[in-house]
Image (tube, rainbow, N blue to C red):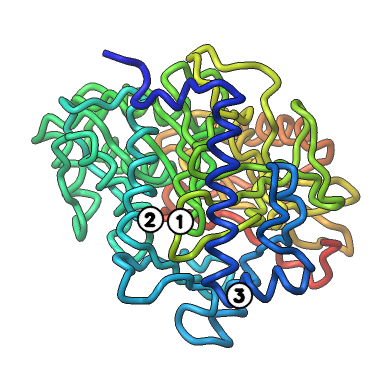
Amino acid sequence: MSRYLEPIEVASREGMQAFQLAKLQEQVQHAYANSPFYRRKFDQAGVKPEQIQSLDDLRRLPFTTKEDLKESQAANGLFGDFLAVPLEQCLRLHQTSGTTGHPVRVLDTEQDWYGFYHMYARALYAMGVRKSDVVVTFFSHGPWIGYWSGFHAAQDLGCLVIPTGGMSTEQRIQLLLDFPITVVGCTPSYALYMAEEARKKGIDLARDTKVRITWHTGEPGAGLPGTKRQIEQAFGAKCFDLPGLTEIAAWGFECEAQSGMVHAHEDYVYPEVLNPETGEPVKPGERGELVFTSLYRKAMPFLRYRTKDIVELSAEPCPCGRTLVAFKGGVVGRTDDMKKVRGVIVYPSRIEEVVRQFDEVDEFFITIHRVSGLDDILVQIDPRPGLSADTVAHIQESIADALRVALGIRATVEMKEPGTLPRWDHKAKRFKDIRTEVPF
């Protein structure tokens, strides 16, 4: 069977750019003609659609931010003034999780929705999912797009898909034991929690189930080597990262080659990687903020949307042979998660990367606070049950040493009683900054 679901995955650079330019020009014309939000943005920037004659001309357009969308919806009703089709043409309504404030509501036409879940299906196919697989999606069954798009994507490939909305973790574990399920989709946090709960019952998911592939979205954890290794050991399966945004798409995927790269569906979403301070493009091998322009969504055609995700353009091609643009390590951080602690830039994802190297850790929580007037990073560790006091003390010291090397500053590591830190079945909230004055 073909490694690729569609020929465009291996298109020439010239062919891809010609396709992107045609789609971009169509999208810019549509947004200007039909979205009051974008007509106003274009006019304020002094830009007309006919000025977009090349992909480089995209930089003439102003950025769109989540704050813009929230303000539009606050001032202009439920859907704001950036809706570019009549409401009766819309088929689906989803919303962001609201982890950084009020959720943003996003509408899709029938074709928009197909584009969203079909590129998701392409991602699953690239991981090795086939029609013969039996799939479950253990996501929160609500207005969040991750559950629905994953479910429809697996159906798009012809897989047997089992709905699990409303099931408890115990019921889901039993489902894995009773049915010949081969593919599981969920957040990385929930995968680790499910494995922990199974162990408490004497169940080894790697031994007692038929799962061969797990994919994870909603959080960046599956792109971190330590977290990936723990999930793969727990399920006896290959673990894949699938980053996405409600506002844009299930935009990326890790392929079967598992080369440490995440490909982007650049025929659906045009990516820019920019220096977040200057707005200038970065070179391969450098990190910058990921900015996306939707080439397919008509109801809400997001143009130059600042994702706040930090990525690194890969300087090497992927062994899988795909010519789609790729990012080394996937999403490596977020501009809004970036903190300065004692003069050093710290990302919570970097702390997780270190902590998850230790298989004895079941859960953790990060707090940045002040002690005696000085910034401190407190990392609370929930260890696996049954460890001796000497082992716990050794792990505490080892994690502290690893964090000092990785971050360049010392962090306080505190060991908790097993099972005392919260667990998560959706997006985990493992970080808080409680300083009253934060440098940024």
Q: Secondary structure at mark 3?
A: helix
Q: Sequence order check: which comes first, mark 1 or mark 3?
A: 3
Measuring from the top left, give residue 143's x and y in whole percent: 34, 66
Residue in the picture at 71% in, 60% down: 63
Q: Sequence order check: which comes first, mark 3 or mark 2?
A: 3
In this view, the residue farthest toward the front is 50
- Tag 3: amino acid: Phe
Q: How packed is label 3: few (under 14 Cα within 10 Å), some, or many (20 or more)?
A: some
Q: Are the residues tagged 1 and 3 within 8 Å (C-beta)?
A: no
Measuring from the top left, give residue 198's x and y in whole percent: 26, 38
Reading the image, the residue beneath label 3 is: 37
Q: Secondary structure at mark 1?
A: loop
The alpha-carbon separation of the residues under discs 1 and 3 comes to 15 Å
Q: Which quadrant, please, contains the C terminus?
A: bottom right
Residue in the picture at 50% in, 72% down: 103
- Tag 1: amino acid: Arg
Reading the image, the residue beneath label 1 is: 297
Residue 219 seen: yes
357 or 237, nearer to the observer: 237
The alpha-carbon separation of the residues under discs 1 and 2 comes to 5 Å
Q: Are the residues tagged 3 and 2 within 8 Å (C-beta)?
A: no
Q: Sequence order check: which comes first, mark 1 or mark 2?
A: 2
In this view, the residue farthest toward the left is 178
- Tag 2: amino acid: Asp
**Hey, which quadrant is residue 426 in on the image?**
bottom left
Q: How packed is label 2: few (under 14 Cα within 10 Å), some, or many (20 or more)?
A: many
In the figure, 63 relative to 156: above or below?
A: below
Residue in the picture at 66% in, 44% down: 333
Residue in the picture at 35% in, 68% down: 93
